[in-house]
């Protein structure tokens, strides 16, 4: 059958992409349809056709999948952040498990590996400790705070994102009232005028410390003292309280949310939080895991896989602010971290000191350059290597050096099971064996999943 643009087709959705589009077939031709889930029988209009696949717009659901649920968030569709919200949480977890398994088989050529159920959350809502709300003005002149509609820069009002903290709405309402009262304008991207660009709110889940950071196109906010008073007068449940109020200055014409400079209006220039027993100091610009509850589970698995007894030398590659390094340091002889972003390493060093950890050392640079260099020149040794690369996975030069260093165990933490599978294939081809695989759901309602893999060295010494 020839498929024509703008025609409607009936199809059964059978699969889901990582970005959350349903996939169905018309005579073998794959059509990607947003807002559908496997099991749905739908009518879709063909909107864009490529040679081997195309895109369709959902016109109607003729027969809903048995896994379909009402998305709890009223703006889920328009926002585009929680692409799986119309699917039961159980099915989301099974989808992610299957994705990992499928990639290991298809891309990694690894069969017969058991992929157990993905570790989910008891309550998969309100899990994020960080939210960044863009501030704008609607066509009637009202100040709006919310989210950019998927892939655009128009703001959908939503001050109470369901995966964000329950404290956000009250803080935003107060700032909005303050802006109206004092005739403070929101920032306008097109004319590069107005003041308030974004509101960043971070919460330390274990300490209850809250940070409010107002991102402005200017150097100060009129009546800053009054804003501080108003925010401090807010009360929150569970003994949470504001520990830091800051402005961040961003006068650039840019999509980047935060500028480089911050100024304290109240409290400390940071908040603190714990993952397990390790304390972290978090500034507005610091990277920090956004789902602390699941992060702790993830790191505990990594720690278990690392099999530390106290005598090991560990290399933690792509270490960020040293979260995994510090988590492992107490159980290892020595941990070396490598990370490309210098500011992240500054945080790692600060956090090591804060916790009295003196057996962790950090290097700034590309893992695929630092490790080969250290190995060639200094013949550095590792009992365990941990990698936690960005989505593109590890560089082959790095994998090659890892194999030469021949650690007993490799723990691979991955946010993309496709590149993970590719890298595992290389390691399996070079003497390593996959022992354990475990998925952890860090980003509930999105298509993403974290995976931890334990590999052991099978080569004779
Ligand atoms: N392990 C950390 C962060 C992992 S995210 C944690 O759990 O918090 C991946 C990190 O890899 C990011 O911090 C990114 O800046 C860093 N990165 C990206 N490319 C890199 C490279 N080529 N070499 C070293 N680090 C890199």
Image: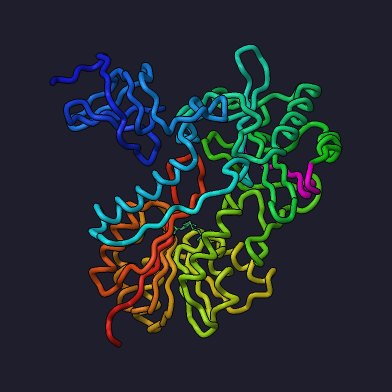
Quadrant in the rendering for residue 248: top right
> Which quadrant holds the C terminus?
bottom left
> Which quadrant holds the N terminus?
top left
Q: Can residue 454 be seen in this view?
A: yes
Q: Main SS type for the magenta part? A: strand
Left or right of 294? Residue 67 is: left
- Which residue is found at the position 62% from the left and 27% from the top? 158
Front residue of 71 and 201:
71
Front residue of 234 and 223:
234
Give the vertical position of 422 relative to 58 (above or below): below
Q: Which residue lies furthest to the front in this view?
A: 66
- Which residue is found at the position 57% from the left and 25% from the top? 74
The part of the chain drawn in magenta is 237-250
Front residue of 275 and 1:
1
Give the vertical position of 122 relative to 163 (above or below): below
Q: Residue furthest left?
A: 1
Q: Residue furthest top?
A: 140
Tell me where residue 367 appears, x and y as whole percent.
41, 66
């Amino acid at each position: 059958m020839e498929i024509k643009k703008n025609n409607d087709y009936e199809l059964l959705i059978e699969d889901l992409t990582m970005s959350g589009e349903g996939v169905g077939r018309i005579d073998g031709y794959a059509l990607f349809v947003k807002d559908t889930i496997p099991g749905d029988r739908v009518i879709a209009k063909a909107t864009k056709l490529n040679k081997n696949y195309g895109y369709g717009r959902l016109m109607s659901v003729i027969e809903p999948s048995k896994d379909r649920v009402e998305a709890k968030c009223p703006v889920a569709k328009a926002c585009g952040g929680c692409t799986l919200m119309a699917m039961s949480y159980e099915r989301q977890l099974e989808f992610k498990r299957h994705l990992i398994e499928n990639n290991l088989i298809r891309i990694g050529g690894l069969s017969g590996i058991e992929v157990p159920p993905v570790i989910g959350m008891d309550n998969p809502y309100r899990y994020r400790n960080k939210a960044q709300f863009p501030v704008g003005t609607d066509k009637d002149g009202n100040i709006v705070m919310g989210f950019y509609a998927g892939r655009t820069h128009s703001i959908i009002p939503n001050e109470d994102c369901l995966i964000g903290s329950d404290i956000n709405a009250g803080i935003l309402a107060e700032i909005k009232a303050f802006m109206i009262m004092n005739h403070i304008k929101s920032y306008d991207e097109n004319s590069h005028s107005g003041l308030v660009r974004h509101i960043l709110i971070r919460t330390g889940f274990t300490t209850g410390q809250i940070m409010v950071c107002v991102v402005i196109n200017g150097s100060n906010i009129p009546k800053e003292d009054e804003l501080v008073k108003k925010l401090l007068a807010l009360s929150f449940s569970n003994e949470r309280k504001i520990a830091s109020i800051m402005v961040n200055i961003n006068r650039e014409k840019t999509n980047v949310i935060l500028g480089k400079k911050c100024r304290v209006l109240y409290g400390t220039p940071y908040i603190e939080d714990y993952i397990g027993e390790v304390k972290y100091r978090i500034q507005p610009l610091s990277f920090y895991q956004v789902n602390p509850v699941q992060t702790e589970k993830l790191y505990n698995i990594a720690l278990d896989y690392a099999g530390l007894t106290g005598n090991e030398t560990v290399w933690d590659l792509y270490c960020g602010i040293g979260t995994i390094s510090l988590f492992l340091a107490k159980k290892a002889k020595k941990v070396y971290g490598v990370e490309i972003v210098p500011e992240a390493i500054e945080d790692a060093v600060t956090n090591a000191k804060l916790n009295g950890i003196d057996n962790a050392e950090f290097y700034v640079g590309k893992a695929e350059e630092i490790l080969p260099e250290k190995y060639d020149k200094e013949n550095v040794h590792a009992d365990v290597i941990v990698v936690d690369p960005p989505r593109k996975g590890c560089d082959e030069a790095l994998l090659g050096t890892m194999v030469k260093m021949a650690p007993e165990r490799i723990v691979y933490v991955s946010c993309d099971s496709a590149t993970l599978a590719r890298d595992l294939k290389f390691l399996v081809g070079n003497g390593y064996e996959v022992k354990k695989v475990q998925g952890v759901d860090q980003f509930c309602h999105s298509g993403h999943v974290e995976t931890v893999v334990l590999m052991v060295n099978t080569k004779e010494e």
